[in-house]
Amino acid sequence: MALSSTVQEASFETEVCPDAHDTAAWSGRIPLIKLTDVWKIYRMGEINFAALSGIDLEIYRGEFVVVLGPSGSGKSTLMNLLGCLDLPSKGAIFLDSRDISSLEESELARIRGQMIGFIFQSFNLIPTMNTLENVLLPLEFQEEDPVRARERGEYLLEIVGLSDKKRNLPSQLSGGQRQRVAIARSLAVNPPVILADEPTGNLDSKTGDYILEFLAKLHEKEGKTIIIVTHDLDLVKHATRVVYIRDGKIEKIEHVNRKKHEGEMK
């Protein structure tokens, strides 16, 4: 089953958001994720190394943000902070208006599990669990009713075109199929944010295009906030904003004219 057809059939309860290209539309709205003067400093022997220096960034509901930077730029560190997987050395990070540094780890894990779905370059599937079991993991962490969780898992595998693979182990799937399982897992609790780390990095170009089309449809049709961290300039055409990062600092932030990109591609 093609991703392009299945994604159009997906239906979730979502908030209607302003046009992400319209700066005025966001005026007065509260950021979904906000970083204020964020630093991440690592101790390396007797030297302090700043992987991130003074990051200020706001991300709103309904945006498609691409964080773009070369290897060693600090984008992976920024991804961990945006996903609330790590805490800053200095500065503040707010997730849905809550300062994550003030939360206990158990509370942070619960909120993170409800708010953010993760897609990793290396898929991060549990090798001893079958496809359906991998998709159900976030629901188990949120202590969802087992019957409802299974219904949700089977539904998500259907929309990514893998209903016939639900009993397969990851080793029995292609790279593209494993990434589609990862996408289904990221949607398990219907989070408002999907955070993807190089989601096409281990895929051939055709399969990568399918994955990006799926994410674009989730953004356009379902109002999901999509954040992609990548070094691939080609992914910019899908974004509403691009955050350029180098040497641990934001160089610039650009709004993207997607209609212009689409016209150039025709």
Image (spheres, rainbow, N blue to C red):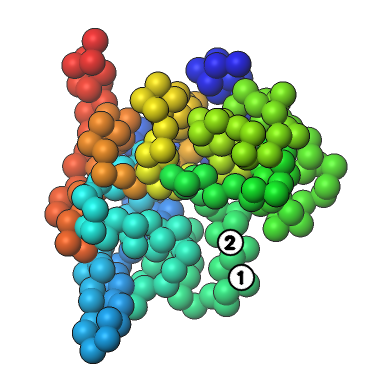
User: Residue extending furthest right?
Assistant: 147
The amino acid type of the residue labelled 1 equals: Glu
Image location (x, y in percent) of residue 220: 44, 28
Q: How far apart are the alpha carbons under marks 1 and 2? A: 6 Å
The amino acid type of the residue labelled 2 equals: Ile
Question: Label 2: which residue?
Answer: 111
Q: Going by the image, does 32 lie left or right of 72? A: right
Image location (x, y in percent) of residue 87: 42, 72
* Count of marks overlaid on the render: 2
Q: Can the viewer see residue 47 in this picture?
A: yes
Classify 56 as above or below 199. Answer: below
Q: Going by the image, does 237 lie left or right of 97? A: left
Classify 207 as above or below 99. Answer: above
Q: Going by the image, does 260 lie left or right of 6? A: left
Q: Can the viewer see residue 99 in this picture?
A: no
Neighbour class for label 2 at 10 Å: few (<14), some, many (≥20)?
Answer: some
Cβ–Cβ under 8 Å for marks 1 and 2: yes
Neighbour class for label 1 at 10 Å: few (<14), some, many (≥20)?
Answer: few
Q: At 23% across and 36% down in the image, what residue appears?
A: 233
User: Residue extending furthest bottom?
Assistant: 46
Of residues 37 and 141, the one drawn nearer to the viewer in this rendering: 141
User: Residue extending furthest top?
Assistant: 266
Say which element carries label 1.
helix
Q: Going by the image, does 247 lie left or right of 119? A: left
Q: Quadrant of residue 207?
A: top left
Of residues 186 and 218, the one drawn nearer to the viewer in this rendering: 186
Q: At 22% across and 28% down in the image, what residue appears?
A: 257
Q: Quadrant of the N terminus?
A: top right
Question: Label 1: which residue?
Answer: 107
Of residues 77 and 19, the one drawn nearer to the viewer in this rendering: 77
Image location (x, y in percent) of residue 182: 56, 41
